[in-house]
Amino acid sequence: MIIEEQNFRIKKITETDKDWLLYPKDSDKPIKLPKAYVYGNLPPVRKFFWQTHTLQIKKYADIIDFIAYAEMDGLILFDIPEEDYPQDVKQKIAHICKIEQEFAQMQQEYTDSLKTQLTEYLSRIPNVKELEDEIGKLPVCWRAYLKMLLPMQYRSTDSLQRLTLMYWLITIANRIYKRHIDTESSISVVFSLLRFAVNESFVQWLSDTMVEEMENNPKFADSDGFLFFQEVRNELNRILPPMPKRLEVYLTQVICRLLSAYSDDFSELELYRNRSFSGTPLSSDSQAYGYLRQQMKLLKFSSLIVEKQFTDEEIAKFSQPY
């Protein structure tokens, strides 16, 4: 469980028999500091009436209303070691930690099963004749990422299959992007950011069991997020061989993530490439992308398919034409 650090500007301080009540600026809800913990009186430093005090606290999540550390105007008010926490706070922390551990274990088991299914499925991925040439036909934001991955084709059969799978997923994402977005319209390109980000946020929390329940629940029949999920999944199944349900959901999620990252990158390219006064681009897509590559999200994309995430240094050194 993570302790949160919070900072406030305090406009007013009052007290009760047991607590100091500190009122943050722009809020009428006070922060309570037990007098039993605070060293001395508040405020620790006197200021003019028009000045505010700075307060820094460290606390657990809101479910545990307990402040473990407080500092005002640079002076420590209290710092309670974990062994001195109240017994009820210790019990709540232990309970939440147990839940978090169980959830983390479930997530790990889910991920392990996905990795197993993915490894078994790779041998069924259709080969792509002249893969490098086919990558070169894609729009620059897609092909730049795949070109960074190209050395994978020489490492092992498994690596080549993973690269090929990424190529197929990107061709699906590219088809869906062009279906929904007018790439000749700057406004359409820029507003695609929101559209695909919203879809991604909906799709990412789905699991195979949740999808089955939603398929059988009429209230999701007209849900924009679920309709988009089904659209992407249908394209996935149209292009690739049948796969286990869990892997199907995951690969659909990967495509949605790719779409979100691509819409961000293509918008970046559209907005910030060099243009003449008439709006005509002054350089090719490849040249413009090269200038802006450090801002591109796809170049740092990773998944269970290709877990490698390129660093800023690796992206800066990549000299192959985009």
Image: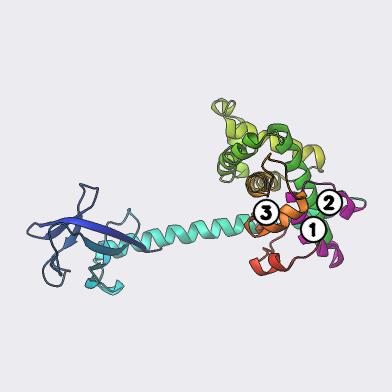
Which residue, given by chain and number where applicable, does mark 3 sit on? 298
Say which element carries label 3.
Answer: helix
Secondary element at tag 2: helix
* Label at residue 117: none
Display colour scheme? rainbow
Q: In this view, does 11 lie to the left or right of 134?
A: left
Is 53 drawn above or below residue 76 in the view shown? above
Residue 86 figure quarter:
bottom left
Query: What whole-number distance in Å separates the C-alpha atoms at marks 1 and 2?
Result: 8 Å
Residue farthest to the front?
277
Choose the circle earlier in sequence order: 3 or 2. 2
Residue 157 painted magenta: yes
Q: Is residue 78 shown in magenta?
A: no
Three-letter amino acid code of the residue under disc 3: Leu
- In the shown orientation, is residue 159 left or right of residue 100? right
Q: How crowded is mark 2: few (under 14 residues within 10 Å), some or many (20 or more)?
A: many
What secondary structure predominates along the stretch shown in magenta?
helix
Q: Give the number of marks.
A: 3
Outermost residue to the left: 17
The reply to whether residue 60 is in sight is yes
How many angstroms separate mark 3 from mark 2 (CA)?
15 Å
Q: Nearer the viewer, residue 34 or 137?
A: 137
Q: Mark 2 points at which residue?
A: 135
- Circle 3 Cα neighbour tier, 10 Å, few/some/many (<14 / 14–19 / ≥20): many
- Label 1: few (<14), some (14–19) or many (≥20) C-alpha neighbours in 10 Å: some
Give the residues in magenta: 130-158
Q: Name the residue under label 1.
A: 147
